[in-house]
Amino acid sequence: FTPHSGEFGGLTGLSPGDIEARPLAAALDYAERERVILVLKGPVTFIAYPGGRYVVVEGLNPSLAAGGSGDVLAGIIGGLLAAGLSPQDAAAAGVCLHQEAGRLAFRKGWFAPGELLPFLRALLGKVQRERAKEGE
């Protein structure tokens, strides 16, 4: 799941204020109870796994709060899953790729979520080239 606090409130019945006051605790509780990986998006993104593990990704980029950006994030994670990454790795790598693409895109100013795609392609190409060099 990749909700922001408002969407997460709809899943849990918690108010966005309650979630924002204790985001990690709320995310971990939900991930454990529902046995899911939860990516709670916000200025700081919390990735919670069943069993109590978590990853915190900082990197405020207000342009990633645009409607549709979360759909791009979900697509990145889905693509990484299809490429063979574990769900845990796909969630963490997807969030980091999304944020880095957003950082690169924002150098030119505000952008629409679809404008992240060329930056994602470039980042993934860079990763593939580096992996190929390691295999040489």
Image (spheres, grey):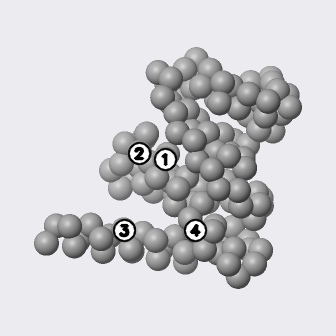
Question: Gap in Å between the C-alphas at discs 2 and 1?
Answer: 5 Å
Tell me the tag on residue 101. 4
Tell me the tag on residue 89. 2
Q: Which residue is mark 3?
A: 127
Question: Gap in Å between the C-alphas at discs 4 and 1?
Answer: 14 Å
Q: Which residue is mark 1?
A: 92
Mark 1: few/some/many CA within 10 Å (<14, 14-19, 20+): some
Question: Gap in Å between the C-alphas at discs 2 and 3?
Answer: 15 Å
At x 57%, y 60%, the residue is 98
51 on left or right of 38: left
Kind of residue at badge 2: Asp
Kind of residue at badge 4: Ala
Mark 3: few/some/many CA within 10 Å (<14, 14-19, 20+): few
Kind of residue at badge 1: Ala
Nearer-N-terminus badge (4/1): 1
Mark 2: few/some/many CA within 10 Å (<14, 14-19, 20+): some
121 on left or right of 115: left
Mark 4: few/some/many CA within 10 Å (<14, 14-19, 20+): many
Nearer-N-terminus badge (2/3): 2
Kind of element beneath mark 4: helix
67 on left or right of 70: right
